[in-house]
Image: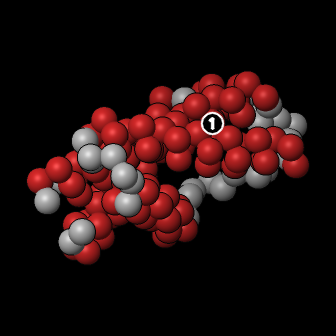
Amino acid sequence: MDKRKVILSALLASVVYLVIGYVFYYVIFTDFFARNAGSAVGVYRGEMIVWAVFLAQLAMGTLTALACTYAPTPGTIRDGMKIGAWIGLLVGVATAFDGYGVSHVQNLLATVADATLWIVRASIAGGVATWMLDKEQT
């Protein structure tokens, strides 16, 4: 596999995670998560630290791109979306329920919604990563 394609795939998947995450959490579902907050107060920053958020998305994009790169399946966009969905399920459930289990940041409904949004985000990122890799053409 061409290393440039893997790097570009990781970067593109990272941007997908960042953009979709912003749209989901700061545009579409802002009110939902505000209504389903736990009893913790003052835990969210007024403004996000962009470099830290991008670093987290870069890690997720790289994980997704590598999973799509080394998957034994042919490498269609649909295959990438399936791989991404599994990554989103595992990472989303792990992070959302770990946070729910140790904090009062959000209630159970918001925890389940957060894990579900992870699946959607990762599925799209996996499809985009696989598209960028263009494995079937190599």
Residue 55 spot, x, y in % from top left: 50, 68
**Residue 24, visible in the rendered structure:** no
Q: Secondary structure at mark 1?
A: helix
Q: Position of residue 130 (x, y in %)?
A: 28, 50
For residue 41, which quarter of the picture? Answer: top right
Q: Farthest residue in the front direction?
A: 72
Pick out the residue farthest to the left: 137
Residue 43 in percent (x, y) is at 76, 52
Quadrant including the N terminus: bottom left
Q: Amino acid at mark 1?
A: Ala
Relative height, residue 1 to residue 102 (above, below): below
Colour scheme in use = secondary structure
Give the answer, above or below, for where 104 lies relative to 65: above
Image position of 4 (left or right of 129): left
Tell me what residue is drawn at x 72 percent, y 34 percent: 111
Residue 37 at x, y percent in the picture: 76, 33
Q: Which residue is mark 1?
A: 115
**Would you say residue 76 is visible in this rendering?**
yes
